[in-house]
Image (cartoon, helix red, strand yellow):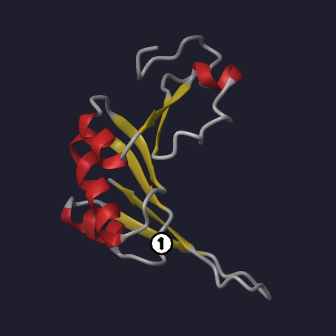
């Protein structure tokens, strides 16, 4: 499978593209099987190493790996030159760090923050950041 191409016209709801995930744990990823394996793959190893070597354009990047601020920021640095003109970058740790907002400003992108506020729940809520052109 070549990244950026669908195998069949139905595989991506009529749109070209594939899912590529990074995963440090080799025992993870069992759900990407059967028909899903036709439109995606997982690259095992360190995410930053994988992203630095990645050659294709990225239309949607979702950061959900090591949640340290430095690692998160380095992932954004790794993908910056690979983003398409309309790419979205989503960070699931934006309630803890400001790294996606910081990176967005540095790269002339806009940033939105969505905060969840659960009512009467033990978890105080998280937040998702979105960086867009």
| Horizontal side of residue 126 vs 110, given as left or right | right
Residue 21 x/y as whole percent: 48, 39
Which residue is rendered at x = 39% and y = 41% of the image? 45
Residue 101 x/y as whole percent: 33, 70
Q: Considering depth in this image, is 8 or 52 the residue closer to the camera?
A: 52
Number of numbered discs: 1
Quarter residue 122 falls in: bottom right
- List the single residue furthest toward the right: 120
| Horizontal side of residue 103 vs 13, given as left or right | left
Which residue is rendered at x = 70% and y = 21% of the image? 34
Residue 124 x/y as whole percent: 65, 85
Which residue is rendered at x = 38% and y = 69% of the image? 68
In the depicted structure, whether residue 112 falls above or below residue 18: below
Q: Considering depth in this image, is 110 or 44 the residue closer to the camera?
A: 44
Q: Please say whether residue 14 is visible from this viewpoint.
A: no
| Horizontal side of residue 16 vs 2, given as left or right | right
Q: The residue tagged with tag 1: helix, strand or loop?
A: strand
- List the single residue furthest toward the top: 8
Residue 112 x/y as whole percent: 44, 68
Which residue is rendered at x = 32% and y = 39% of the image? 50
In the depicted structure, whether residue 83 falls above or below residue 1: below
| Horizontal side of residue 3 vs 10, given as left or right | left
Quarter residue 66 falls in: bottom left
Which residue corresponds to mark 1?
113
Quarter residue 3 falls in: top left
Local packing at callout 1 (Cα closer than 10 Å; few below 14, some 14-19, many 20+) is some
Q: Please say whether residue 71 is visible from this viewpoint.
A: yes
């Amino acid at each position: 499978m070549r990244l950026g191409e669908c195998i069949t016209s139905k595989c991506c709801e009529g749109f070209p593209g594939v899912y590529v995930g990074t995963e440090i744990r080799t025992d993870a990823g069992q759900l990407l099987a059967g028909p899903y394996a036709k439109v995606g793959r997982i690259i095992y190893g360190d995410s930053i190493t994988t992203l630095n070597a990645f050659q294709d354009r990225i239309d949607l990047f979702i950061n959900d790996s090591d949640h340290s601020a430095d690692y998160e920021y380095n992932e954004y640095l790794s993908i910056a030159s690979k983003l398409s003109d309309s790419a979205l970058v989503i960070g699931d740790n934006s309630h803890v760090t400001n790294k996606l907002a910081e990176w967005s400003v540095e790269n002339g992108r806009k940033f939105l923050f969505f905060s969840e506020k659960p009512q009467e729940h033990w978890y105080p809520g998280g937040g998702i950041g979105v960086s867009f052109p």
